[in-house]
Amino acid sequence: MYVDQWGEIHPPPDPEKGKPPNPSQLGGTEETEVLGPTGMNQRLKRYGTGKARNREMAAFLAQQEPERSRNPYKRLSHDLYECCSWLALHHYPAADKLIVGRATTCKKHLLCPLCALFRGGKMVARYVERCAHLAPEHDFQLVTLTVKNGPDLFERYLHLKHSFKTLRTRGRDGYGVWANVSGAVWSTEFTHSAHGWHPHLHMVVATPKGTPPFRYGQGSPLSDAWLAVTGDSYIVHASPIGANGQPLLDGLSEVMKYALKFADLPLDQNLHAYNTLKGRRLLQASGCFFGLVLPDDAELTDDPLDGPFIEYLFNYTSRGYRMAGVPSTHTQRRTHGTQS
């Protein structure tokens, strides 16, 4: 199933305040109007604003010079700078699909908004397919769990992680609000304010058909159970979502865009979060959703389609993405793995 993962996202309400901007709000670049398929210029605008933040981070890393040592971020800065400096969009006229066909990516999705966009889009596509398979026997809900702010990012992360593990363990053992959950996919997100770091979980939860949905609010079973495992937090949110269509896409996108939200932090805080959390599993799944998470080194371009396509090649400049050369026609035959 192909999912247009780059459409506008309208996340459902939750208790978090001050939501980070979507990709089209990341920064200002001059967009170039290109004569091409519908949606190409909007796509280039989102990619261009993401790339602008990418270049800001690359420059910030290049300026780091700790005392009595060489810059440890030199290679990382170079990788970010080169990431998607050029990219090829492939338009398949027969299917009217526009995909990212070729690009060199840094795969540092906690620092690079473009890699966060590509990775999140591929994850949404995977989980939409799994939800379609589970829909005849399951209902779905979007759930948010929060903990109190604190000055130590790693301590707050571990507190949230271990609390949720305790909640799931109790459900696995057959008691508590999590006992009827068939599976979940969740991401750990972070915001920062004058009160410190605020980690929270967004997740899509599958329960057997007919299971009463979670209720939230102080005094609700979900809130009381969360307070019991955290010892300090009771703010939660839960809302049913459909098994297909836009509500499901919105819910999954809210979970999968966790890495993109790092781009809302100041550059120094973004780098601190990256150094603290790199190698940590910030996107996880259990039960009926287990096994779909992309490895860190996965290719982030879209899977090709069959049939002829037109390739549009772009390179990034100070004025945004500009077309490089004349569009060319090719034919993709996935069965034989050849292009002509």
Image (tube, rainbow, N blue to C red):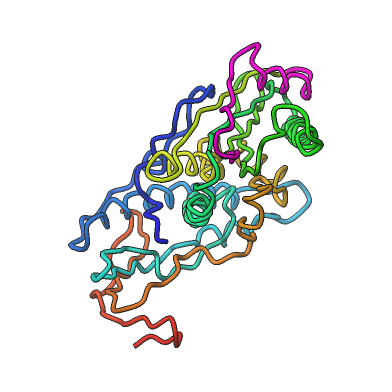
Q: Looking at this rendering, what residue extends furthest in the top direction?
A: 219
**Tally of marks:** 0
Residue 37's x, y, as percent? 22, 62
Q: Looking at this rendering, what residue extends furthest in the left direction?
A: 35
Task: Please give the name of the residue rendered at 54% of the width and 57% of the height, measured from the top-left corner.
Answer: 80
Task: Please give the name of the residue rendered at 46% of the width and 26% of the height, measured from the top-left corner.
Answer: 13
Quadrant where the image shows the C terminus: bottom left
Q: Is residue 109 left or right of residue 250?
A: right
Which one is nearer the viewer's eye here, 294 or 286?
Answer: 286
Q: Is residue 319 left or right of residue 231?
A: left
Which one is nearer the viewer's eye here, 268 or 39?
Answer: 39
In this rendering, the answer to whether 17 lies above or below 274 is above
Task: Please give the name of the residue rendered at 50% of the width and 61% of the height, measured from the top-left corner.
Answer: 83
Question: Is 226 inside the magenta-drawn segment?
Answer: yes
Q: Is residue 260 left or right of residue 339?
A: right
In this rendering, the answer to whether 230 lies above or below 70 is above
Question: Is 234 inside the magenta-drawn segment?
Answer: no
Residue 320's x, y, as percent? 33, 54
Residue stretch rendered in magenta on the structure: 205-232
In this rendering, the answer to whether 60 lies above or below 264 is below
Residue 335's x, y, as percent? 44, 84
Task: Please give the name of the residue rendered at 66% of the width and 19% of the height, measured from the top-left corner.
Answer: 223
Quadrant where the image shows the N terminus: bottom left
